Amino acid sequence: MDNTKRQPGKPGWRFVFLALAAAVILSGLVRSLWLDVYYIPSASMEPLFNTGDRILVSRTDFQSDPIRRGDVVVFDGRGSFAPLNSGSGPLQEALASAGHWLGLTGSDTTYVKRVIGLPGDSVVCCDDQHRLTVNGQPLVEPYLYAGDEPSSQKFSASVPAGRVWLLGDHRSVSADSRSLLGAPGGGMVRMDRVIGRPVQILWPLDRFASVARPPLAAITTTKDGQ
């Protein structure tokens, strides 16, 4: 007869460890394929998103309905918005990645902006009424931060195939495609760098709300200024 006594607690802790490992793996799978959580580190997308908001991002929305003008997108800015080498050491990068994965901090390479120009578009600032124009027609921009101009910086940009032109809604504090006109790529972001679309504000709780996608006709160019 085996008189060895079972050590109390060990099977329970083993189960907890395995359950936790399974939860982390499942969470990683979900976040890599369907949904992710991002922290908003700046005021560049006010009034839609405030500094400190945590947002839920769908990675699959644009698979069935392609990106259109006016969409808000989360994207990987490496090679366009982000420096190719931030100079951070391995430990700092690991800590930053952990904080970003947990939704506690922002990312040096991930951005949230609004699509203004699609492939083939010509985006110009500004017409005689100080509105942005796309392909010669003025943009309707109801999402702009109150009191902001469409742009205080004049520019003219042609969007090449496979890329998009992006601006923040709080134009006076946003570093966006305008800031990179003279850089390699001209501030254009490759469409395959788009991670997904914000669909929900998760935190703080008093701002818990879904993020609607603009209707097709809401953010389009108008004709004859109408």
Image (cartoon, rainbow, N blue to C red):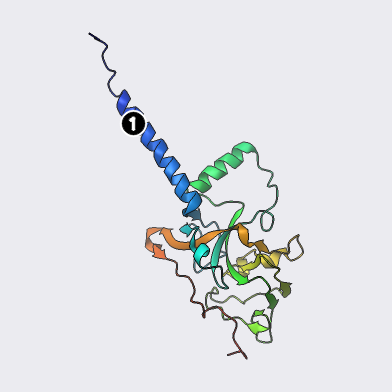
Task: Check the picture and name the quadrant holding the N terminus.
Answer: top left
Quarter of the image holding residue 75?
bottom right
Q: Position of residue 59 (x, y in %)?
A: 50, 57
> Is residue 53 visible from the viewing direction of this image?
no
Against 4, residue 31 (above or below) is: below
Image vertical order of residue 142 relative to residue 200, above or below: below
Residue hosting label 1: 15
User: Would residue 216 be seen by someone viewing this image from the given angle?
Assistant: yes
Picture coordinates of residue 212 (x, y %)? 45, 70
Left or right: residue 204 versus residue 89 is left
Relative to the observer, which residue lies in front, 128 or 163? 163
How many marks the image carries: the answer is 1
Residue visible at 73% across and 64% down in the picture:
186
Instruction: Pick the residue in front: 174 or 17.
Output: 17
Residue 114, image quadrant: bottom right
The relative height of residue 33 versus residue 164 in the rendered view (above or below) is above
Image quadrant of residue 174?
bottom right
x and y percentages locating residue 22 in the rendered image: 40, 38
Q: Is residue 216 left or right of residue 161?
A: left
Residue type pointed to by label 1: Phe
